Image (spheres, rainbow, N blue to C red):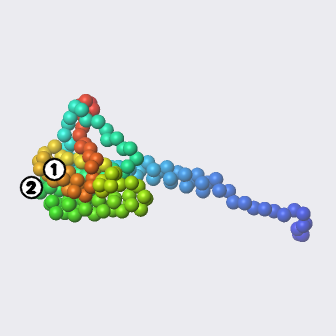
Amino acid sequence: MSHSAGSEVKSEPNLTPILDMVFQLITFFMLVINFKSAEMDMTLNLPVIGSARPVADHGEGVLVLNVKNVGGQPAVTFYGRTLLGADQVRGYLAGEGHASMMKQKLTREDIDSGKGELKETIVIRADDRTPFGDVNLVVTACQEQGYRKFALKALNFRSHNR
């Protein structure tokens, strides 16, 4: 059988099933992955306070620190990693502060009033049995690195009792 020159057959692949599968995978991973829960230590018993409010994020970064007392020493947990003792906590915060400062310089963001203040908000989630001295150690270590914005997480007793 001979093929005539005027009847060319063009074959194009049907991309609809492939695109459908890609969109389903993207949706699946968007629903399954929750980065915020990775920051939080869900084993902490947060204090219950009537005036607790959600943390306002104004576009700057947020660093979540979970604070508890382990064996008489302050322990800070973030993304499943635990730092035990004041020296480890200060060392970690020094590294985070330096990285934040470099990021601000690279993006040419003004460092507040030239005082070396960082724009990130430190969110402290302290267990209700954690001594004040441990929380104060974390806050002081953050202030030494240039962090000035803090939020303490607690549960609102109205939402907690439901």
Dot 1 or dot 2: first in sequence order is: 2
> In the structure shown, which secondary structural element does the residue marked by tag 1 occupy?
helix
> In the structure shown, which secondary structural element does the residue marked by tag 2 occupy?
loop
Around disc 1, counting alpha carbons within 10 Å, would you say few (fewer than 14), some (14 to 19), or many (20 or more)?
few
Q: Position of residue 72 (x, y in %)?
A: 9, 55
Q: Residue furthest bottom?
A: 2
Around disc 2, counting alpha carbons within 10 Å, would you say few (fewer than 14), some (14 to 19), or many (20 or more)?
few
Give the position of the N terminus as an image quadrant.
bottom right
Q: Is residue 76 visible?
A: no
Q: Position of residue 140 (x, y in %)?
A: 18, 53
Report the amino acid beneath label 2: Gly
35 horizontally vs 48: left or right: right
Which one is in front in this view, the residue at disc 1 or the one at disc 2? 1
149 horizontally vs 58: left or right: left
Q: Residue at x 20, y 51 (%)?
A: 139
- Residue at which label 2 appears: 72
When asked about the image quadrant of residue 45, the answer is: top left
Q: Residue at x 26, y 46 (%)?
A: 150
109 horizontally vs 39: left or right: right
Q: Residue at x 22, y 57 (%)?
A: 144
Q: Residue at x 41, y 50 (%)?
A: 32
- Residue at which label 1 appears: 136
Report the amino acid beneath label 1: Asn
When asked about the image quadrant of residue 11, the answer is: bottom right
Cα separation between marks 1 and 2: 15 Å
